[in-house]
Image: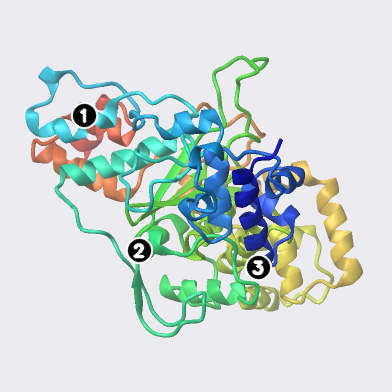
Amino acid sequence: MRDEHQMSIGGLIASLRERQGWSQRALAKWVGIDQSAVSRIEAGRRRLSADELQRFADALHVSADELLGAAPAVYSLVTDDAAEAAAAPPLAMRGQRMHASQAPPEHAALEHVVRPAPRHAFRSYVAGPAAPFGRSGLAGLPDEVAGVARDWFALRELAGVSEPAQRWSTGHSAEGKPGRVAHTAASLRRGAPDADVLYDRVARFWRSELHIDPDDGPLPDLVPLLEDGYGAQVIVARVAGTTAPASSADAPTAAEMPVAAAFADAGIPFVYVNAARPVVLQRFALAHAFAHLVLGHGDVVDHHIEWSRNVPPEAAANDFAEELLAPVRAVQRWYESRAASRLTDVDDLLHLGNAFGISPWAALYRSRAAGRLHGKQFHLLRSELRRHEWELLPRQAYLGGLRDTLTHLTPDEALPAGEYGGPAVLRVPAAMRAGALSAVRDGRLSLEGAAAVLHLEPGELAEQFARLGLE
């Protein structure tokens, strides 16, 4: 049975969708539900959860309050579970609580860093961009990653830092506005990209902003580049592994765990990449997540890389990532330097992929964009890649190639799925290491507390300090 409040919000969603030129299918993919569910919501025959409400708001360039403003009775539009989730207290933190005798009063700011968090407890982002992390959540974000983000803010609080961070940009933004602009990452416009933006040009702009020649390649090391050049806090974590029995219905699989995420809180941008995948796929996922951040798509958790052109934000992020990692002109020069008069083959794609740190599939499409592949030759190579799909990444890893932070963190570059090990945080943002070191040296944080924040054993951290002469 339909009620007038459900019909009001459904009608507003339909109107906003049509104004943006989206089909129900495209909107459904962006929100993460079936097209039939979108149809029922727009017709007022299905209720929205709080999580779905926020995802619709993000996609349609409005706030959740604006969608709810379509109907006076707010709580009639959401399920009972959603209302209960919205009233839940802030989430607790990861790790073990420090005993009171182990931490002096000045350590109290970090007490919430080391409390355990329930798994899969995160809710949609509904409190606004200025809310402290932990009072809002991002649906689908792994607990390990959210714990690092909250620890980041706890260390910042311990150091007494309160001013907002700003990103600086020169030249032209993605919307084509000239001049020098300052903005916080959280202020970027959410939702679907504009159809008339050429995202390869936006990628070249950002290569320039990161002090890399827009037409040169490859990128030297994407992780420190994003942290030092843009101010993003990069988290590398392995979240696909599990210690649960293979037959357990609750055991997560690699396919269920997100490959990357981009989110902002209190003006601080965070980017996460899953290390339980081959390095070339990690590198693309990291560039893809960075695209979501700078193109203003809002908070995004990618459970896989969506290649359909029917999902505008994903298509935009893919176009951006391809050009950021392997500019067309650089690919053309790579082929020219090899003086190859013969037809391009799979070995060429493997070598091109290693030169730029991309997969053979990405190398195939960059070769076509560079004018090296046409028609029948492209389709033949694509068929050959499909036939040898499972051996290509190990072959590429064996041949060697670009080395960076991700290859250092994942030395076995192309293991079969499920063999990367159990869940672990492999890298926290560099700012956290500096903050933890400063806090330990000043006596504001115990060695045990610093080790918990940095996801290290206390003995391991003490050994690192001793080796560096920081005892």
Query: Quick one: quadrant of the N terminus?
Result: top right
Residue 332 seen in the figure = yes
The quarter of the displayed image where residue 181 is located:
bottom left
Residue at 53% x, 40% y is: 51
Mark 1 or mark 2, earlier in chain: 1
Label 2 close to label 3 by CB (< 8 Å): no
> What residue sits right under mark 2 in the picture?
184
Residue 378 is left or right of residue 322, and the answer is: right
> What residue sits right under mark 1 in the picture?
111
**Badge 1 amino acid:** Glu
Query: Quick one: quadrant of the C terminus?
Result: top left
Q: Residue furthest right?
A: 376
Crowding around mark 1 (Cα neighbors within 10 Å: few <14, some 14 to 19, many 20+) is some
Residue at 83% x, 57% y is: 382
Residue 367 x %, y %: 73, 69
Mark 1 or mark 3, earlier in chain: 3
Residue 423's label in the rendered image is none
Vertically, is 212 above or below 32? below
> What residue sits right under mark 3 in the picture?
19
Helix, strand or loop status at disc 2: loop
Helix, strand or loop status at disc 3: helix
The quarter of the displayed image where residue 230 is located:
bottom left
Helix, strand or loop status at disc 1: helix
Residue at 77% x, 44% y is: 36
Residue 159 is left or right of residue 130, and the answer is: left
